[in-house]
Amino acid sequence: MAVSVGAQAKALGLGISPAAYLSLPVPISMVNFTGVNYASEGARIWNNFYADDSTQVTIPLLEQVDKFVATKAQMEPKLGRSELKKVLSNSIFLLSFGTTDRFHVWYLQNLMFKNDQTNVQYLLSSYGVGIKALFEAGARKFAVINVPPIGCTPGGQMPWRRRGYVRGQCDKSKNKLAMEFNDGLRHLLATFSSELHGFRYSVADLYGFANATFATPSAAGFVNTNTQCCPNPCMPGFGEPCENRSQYWFWDYSYPTEKAAKLAAAAFYDGSAQFTVPINFKKLVQRK
């Protein structure tokens, strides 16, 4: 349940989301260049689970970092090292990871399979490795969206071999993991801010924003915040999406509708201090 890159791009003043990395020409063109989108559906911090599933095409964090480094190498001959360093230091690096990993951790814990992959601190450490790699490659401004209440998604409400399931009721055990991750993420970024010279950040609280909306959905124009608009799987041949999609928070089993994404993006970009720490995305853009 992440806020789309496109929604955040528009909040930042761009007409559309930056072009997808795999669609760009090689070498990259700097004509009308606004950035690069490395995002991948279902992207995760860890890259070692689902390793035996040939159908997985998601791009994990460190692989996305590698693609950024490759982009940087193509830009340097065109801009020069000094100008490239300036461009990167003024750019916003939008990160939204952890939701898929949190689901994975919950499954392992409920299967009583204990190892490092059930440890929140280990996951955060892995996230930190990726963020530091970006910093070392020249990134300075990090806009980071935390993990939403995954136990409230249509997929997260499912029993998964558990009894006592009630449709529309949030799974507290999944949400507890999400909150633990979010607390650690805030601490991790605050630590980087004090240790890494020039490191600047903003944490967007998608967890808090979603819960606030769920508490009074009608205030934001939502009628349904616990079931999905599009059938599962959300693809042709499995039924039609709902007609009143603007009244739904969830588009499918996990992801928000366009309206939900836009509302969250607006709150994170130029909203009150309630949902961004220590500053909102707009102030992060303006910082030198």
Image (cartoon, rainbow, N blue to C red):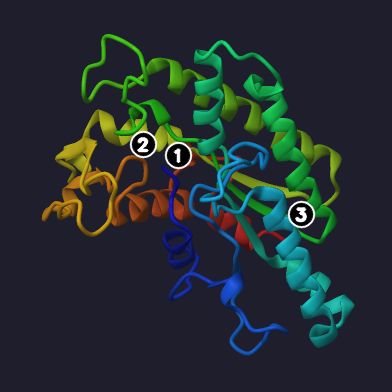
Please tell me whether residue 117 is drawn above or below residue 260 in the rendered image.
above
Mark 2 and mark 3: span between their CA atoms? 28 Å
The residues tagged by marks 1 and 2 sit, at their Cα atoms, a distance apart of 6 Å
Residue 134, numbered label: 3
Of marks 2 and 3, the one in the foreground = 3
Local secondary structure at mark 3: helix
**Amino acid at pointer 2:** Ala
**What's under tag 3, amino acid-wise?**
Leu
Residue at mark 2:
210
**Residue 264: percent from left, percent from top:** 39, 48
Secondary element at tag 2? helix
Q: Distance between the Cα atoms at labels 1 and 3?
A: 23 Å
Q: Is residue 170 above or below residue 27?
A: above
Quick check: 79 above or below 134? below
Taking depth in this image into account, of 6 and 12 the one nearest to the observer is 6
- Residue 191 lies, in percent from the top left, at 77, 34
Picture mark count? 3
> Which residue is under mark 1?
206
Q: Quadrant of residue 288?
A: bottom right
